Image (spheres, rainbow, N blue to C red):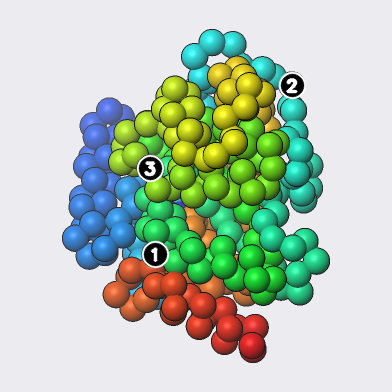
């Protein structure tokens, strides 16, 4: 898991103290990478979830700010079509009247989210497609703050443009982003040209309206609002998966994310079906 580190850095630290702190954190990151299959390196990394999954902790400041994309970024919040939840900050996939609700908290730059998607993502979607539950996506962007760059927000804004085209287009683009996620220290998603290249993999997505919205950052203020909602949610890590209010441990004892069959069994056991 990628979790949010607390804001322990003191503003009056000397350069030497900051260097020592950075070295200490890098040592922690190296240790986690040795212990876990799914390392998540941010400013602070700790071993948290049962089974040893690494939790990358966010230093989100709650205001959702980050370096704007090249050119002028709009300041007016334009909410995509097909949003849900408070202020249109939630994306719902599946039958909105489904009896059960799976809440998924993710950051598009989060490597552990990518591991979970590659391992059990198809099963997560299948259970929504067959009506077992609906999925509520709560998207974060704290890794921009932790690692530098703007990839989380640029990808999130582009996902908003995809959502405006349709929930199915959002879900397909969501999956393409994770399937092509850059190494976490590389801000690959911060390049709108790369985002547009990936959009080619979703049939029918790359309309003139989508391309214009991605290029001009139309949904960037909305992405900031979505990220701020995550920061206020109380969730400290990504990925976090909650079914009907109960947080699920979607990692095995070896620290790796559950395979599709084990994920499905966990859901069936949790809902008693």
Question: Is label 2 in contact with label 3 (beta carbons under 8 Å)?
Answer: no
199 relative position to 251: left or right: right
Label 2 sits on a secondary structure element that is loop
Q: Please report whichever mark, 2 or 3, sits nearer to the chain's N-terminal start.
A: 2
Q: Which of the 4 image quadrants contains residue 125?
A: bottom right
Label 1 sits on a secondary structure element that is helix
Image coordinates for residue 50, horizontal then vertical, percent: 39, 75
Image coordinates for residue 29, horizontal then vertical, percent: 26, 51
> Which residue corresponds to the image point at 43% horizontal and 47% vertical from the top-left?
178
Question: Is label 2 in contact with label 1 (beta carbons under 8 Å)?
Answer: no
The Cα atoms of the two marked residues, 3 and 1, are separated by: 15 Å
Judging depth in this view, the residue of 231 and 173 nearest the camera is 173
> Which residue corresponds to the image point at 44% horizontal and 66% vertical from the top-left?
120
19 relative position to 273: left or right: left
Residue on which disc 2 sits: 76
Residue on which disc 3 sits: 180
Image coordinates for residue 93, horizontal then vertical, percent: 67, 56
118 relative position to 249: left or right: left
Judging depth in this view, the residue of 110 and 147 nearest the camera is 110
Q: Is residue 31 above or below residue 15?
A: below
Q: Which of the 4 image quadrants contains residue 10?
A: top left
User: Within 10 Å of the Cα at label 3, are there few (<14), some (14-19), or many (20+) other Cα atoms?
Assistant: few
| Visible residue check, residue 9 | no
Judging depth in this view, the residue of 120 and 130 nearest the camera is 130
Tell me, for residue 70, which label it has, or none.
Answer: none
> Which residue corresponds to the image point at 68% horizontal and 47% vertical from the top-left?
167
**Across the whole image, how many numbered discs are drawn on residues?**
3
Q: Please report whichever mark, 3 or 1, sits nearer to the chain's N-terminal start.
A: 1
The Cα atoms of the two marked residues, 2 and 1, are separated by: 38 Å
Q: Please report whichever mark, 2 or 1, sits nearer to the chain's N-terminal start.
A: 2
Looking at the rendering, in which quadrant would you find the N terminus?
Answer: bottom left
Residue on which disc 1 sits: 119
């Amino acid at each position: 898991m990628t979790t949010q580190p607390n804001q322990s850095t003191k503003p009056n630290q000397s350069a030497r103290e900051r260097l020592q702190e950075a070295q200490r954190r890098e040592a922690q990151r190296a240790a986690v990478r040795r212990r876990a299959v799914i390392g998540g390196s941010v400013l602070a990394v700790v071993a948290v979830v049962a089974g040893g999954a690494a939790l990358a902790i966010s230093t989100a400041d709650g205001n959702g700010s980050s370096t704007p994309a090249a050119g002028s970024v709009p300041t007016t919040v334009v909410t995509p079509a097909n949003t849900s939840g408070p202020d249109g900050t939630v994306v719902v996939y599946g039958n909105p009247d489904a009896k059960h609700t799976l809440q998924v908290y993710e950051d598009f730059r989060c490597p552990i989210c990518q591991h979970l998607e590659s391992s059990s993502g198809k099963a997560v979607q299948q259970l929504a497609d067959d009506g077992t539950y609906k999925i509520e996506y709560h998207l974060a962007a704290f890794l921009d703050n932790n690692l530098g760059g703007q990839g989380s927000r640029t990808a999130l804004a582009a996902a908003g443009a995809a959502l405006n085209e349709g929930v199915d287009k959002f879900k397909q683009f969501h999956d393409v982003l994770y399937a092509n996620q850059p190494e976490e220290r590389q801000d690959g998603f911060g390049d709108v040209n790369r985002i547009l290249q990936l959009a080619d993999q979703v049939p029918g997505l790359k309309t003139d309206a989508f391309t214009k919205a991605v290029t001009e950052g139309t949904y960037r203020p909305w992405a900031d609002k979505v990220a701020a909602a995550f920061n206020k949610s109380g969730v400290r890590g990504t990925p976090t998966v909650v079914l009907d209010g109960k947080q699920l441990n979607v990692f095995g004892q070896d620290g790796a994310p559950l395979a599709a069959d084990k994920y499905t069994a966990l859901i069936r056991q949790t809902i008693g079906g």
